[in-house]
Image (cartoon, rainbow, N blue to C red):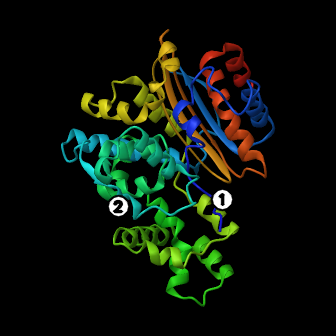
Amino acid sequence: MKVALFISGIVLVIALFIIVAGVRQRADKRDGHYLLNYLKHHKNWSLTVVRNGETLKSVREDEMLPLASAVKTIIAIEYAKQCREQTLDPSHSVSLEELERYYIPNTDGGAHEDWMAYSKDKGLLPGNSTTLENVVKGMIAFSSNANTDYLMDLLGVNKINGLLDELSIEKHEALYPVVGALLIPTYLKMKDPSYTTDYIESKVKEMSKEEYIRIAQTVSQNLKEGEKGLYLENWHSSKRLDKIWSDRLTRSTTFEYATLMGKLNSKSFFQREIQERLDAVMEGIMESHINREWLMHAGKKGGSTEFLVTNAAYATDKEGNSTEIAIFTNELGAGEFEKISGSLNSFMLNILRDEDFRNKLKEL
């Protein structure tokens, strides 16, 4: 059965080159204006854009919306922090078998497979293993959910969530295992095969946040202990369950994430060792020589499900202009996902490089 719902970096080309000028795109240069026009006529979104330290535009920036994979930025920061504390070594070897335990085929838009193919092509998989830093890059640049749940276990969920206070992020729900949550319906069906799909849908939708997170963590532990095959044999999903999973993803606001992007962009908020590790995993887009021609530095993390698209990015160009952008959409209708994700690259690029476009943005 095809599982349409996934937390991804949209597509690989966007994940790696979101700010590339002149890169081949599925859409033409008008696509940035498509998204701008969409925002004018809908209210299922929030936006915060900061330019040179001043808010250029904010709309519903305090509204709590599902983050999808944008939340993985928090995990990357905790990773960098633990490396600085020498709790972790970025060159530590991680067995691919450990990651495979968390990988559920056809649930992440091909993100994990794309990361594996990229890593193999770059010679980063010696002896059926890879470095811890490459695992983190797989979570950020490719949005592998398997890598994400592995890292959450390695770093400690409580430490990751404790980081929210350290970063002074006030409006942010707790993080929990992504793959673990996806398998909650299967967990319930395994617990009692007599449960109907309707009952499971109502159960998952109505359970408390605490119970939902507890079961997600239980499932994740089951996967770690080698029970993936059992879950695959009893796989249980539906379109409505996909929507519930999307709706229950960790939520925050564009204000919080634009502010977080500002911390990354400043290069002064984090200690030097932490910033160096973050640059290594967050700024894959700077591998492009085209980006290096006009940008000093830039990074991003976006995500999507069938029902939403999110993106949080930062950049400083060689003229010294700093920009932070956070845009969250939700409740996307049929066909809107592809149009919005296809136009997002141009939309972000226009904000960075086109003053006329920024002026139009102000008029929203």
Residue type at mark 2 is Glu
Instruction: Give the distance between the C-alpha atoms of the residues marked 2 and 1, in whole angstroms.
Output: 25 Å
Q: Is residue 70 something one can see in this rendering?
A: yes
Q: Quadrant of the C terminus?
A: top right
- What number is the disc on residue 97? 2
- What number is the disc on residue 4? 1
Residue closest to the far bottom: 194
Residue type at mark 1 is Ala
Q: Label 2: few (<14), some or many (≥20) within 10 Å?
A: few
Of label 2 and label 1, which has the lower sequence position?
Answer: 1
Q: Secondary structure at mark 2?
A: helix
Q: Is residue 77 above or below residue 292?
A: below
Q: Is residue 314 above or below residue 10?
A: above
Q: Position of residue 218 (x, y in %)?
A: 40, 72
Q: Position of residue 317 (x, y in %)?
A: 50, 15
Q: Are marks 2 and 1 in contact (CB under 8 Å)?
A: no
Numbered disc in front, either 2 or 1: 2
- Name the residue at 65% across, 82% down: 199
Q: Secondary structure at mark 1?
A: loop
The foreground one among 318 and 227 is 227
